[in-house]
Amino acid sequence: MYKTRLNSNRILCTLAVAGAALALVTFLPANASAAGKTKSTVAPAQKVQGEGHLMIRRSANLGAYAVGLSVDGVQTATINYNGHYDAPLAAGKHVLSVIPIPNRMAGKARETQLTVEAGKTYSFTAKRDNDDYVLK
């Protein structure tokens, strides 16, 4: 009886290890190849041929607050002290919004409309406007 239980445990353990190895082989290559790619923050319907470049600097006088940046409603970056955001942006219409992090004063996200043209660079500075942050 002891040998039967021991063999049963070995079989279960072998099956568990084989299942885990199969799961790793199945999912690891897909995740490894996607690791270096960045996720697009633009809805497919808005994409137009070409891209521009977006640069956002954080004003030095914002104290300990970071700047939360969203592009087209998708949280894109958190810009900390002495930091900046620098990335390509698909040509077309976009909505940029910034908000203080942490948002202790319950400030509203301030939106900036931007129409990106291929090959052009757009530069903004995130600054304080009362309790809200704005792009100027």
Image (spheres, helix red, strand yellow):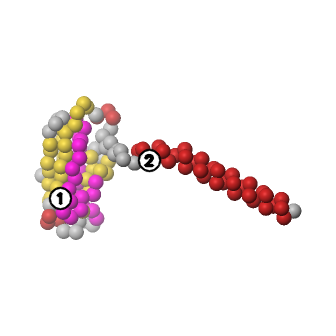
Q: Residue at x 17, y 55 (%)?
A: 57
Residue 136 in percent (x, y) is at 12, 52
Residue 58 bears which disc, if any?
1
Q: CA distance from mark 1 to mark 2?
A: 33 Å
Task: Give the image quarter of residue 129.
Answer: bottom left
Residue 7 in percent (x, y) is at 79, 58
Evaluate whether residue 130 shows in this view. Answer: no
Residue closest to the far top = 49
Name above or below for residue 133 compared with residue 87: below
> Overall secondary structure of the magenta stretch?
strand
Q: Residue at x 31, y 51 (%)?
A: 75
Label 1 crowd (10 A; few <14 / some 14-19 / many >=20): many
The amino acid pointed to by label 2 is Ala
Label 2 crowd (10 A; few <14 / some 14-19 / many >=20): few
Left or right relative to 133: residue 70: right
Considering depth in this image, is 85 or 37 the residue closer to the camera?
A: 37
